[in-house]
Amino acid sequence: MNAEHPSTATSQRSDGSRPDLSNANVREDLALAGRCALVHLPSGRTCLLPLRHHGPCDFHGPDEAADVVSAEQ
């Protein structure tokens, strides 16, 4: 997926739902917090950038992702 031309699978619908939540490569708790939440499956690291960010993903470890989720609640 190219950041300049995001696929419709990662876009939000007009009702705010994300159709990509059913994918194994998207972490649901982060996605619901408005983050990209794309998981790099071989490493288990997750992108913490905002949804539909420009440029490449910025992957972080599970501890950092858990901190983001707890801060968003």
Image: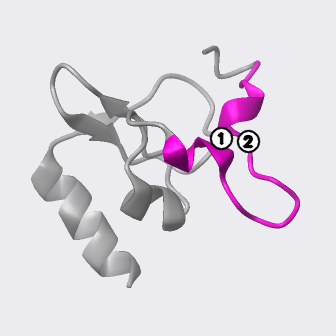
Figure quadrant of the C terminus: bottom left
Counting from the top left corner in percent of width and height, residue 14 is at 88, 60
| Residue at 83% across, 67% down | 15
Q: Amino acid at mark 2?
A: Ser
Q: Tell me which label, 1 or 2, sits earlier in the chain.
A: 2
Counting from the top left corner in percent of width and height, residue 61 is at 15, 43
The residue lying furthest to the top in this view is 2
Whether residue 71 sits left or right of residue 23 in the image: it is: left
Residue ID for mark 1:
52
Residue ID for mark 2:
11
Q: Nearer the viewer, mark 1 or mark 2?
A: 2
The residue lying furthest to the left in this view is 63
Q: Amino acid at mark 1?
A: Arg
- Circle 2 packing at 10 Å, graded few (<14), some (14-19), many (20+), is some
Q: In this picture, which residue range is highlighted in magenta?
A: 5-22
* SS label for mark 1: loop
| Residue at 82% across, 53% down | 13
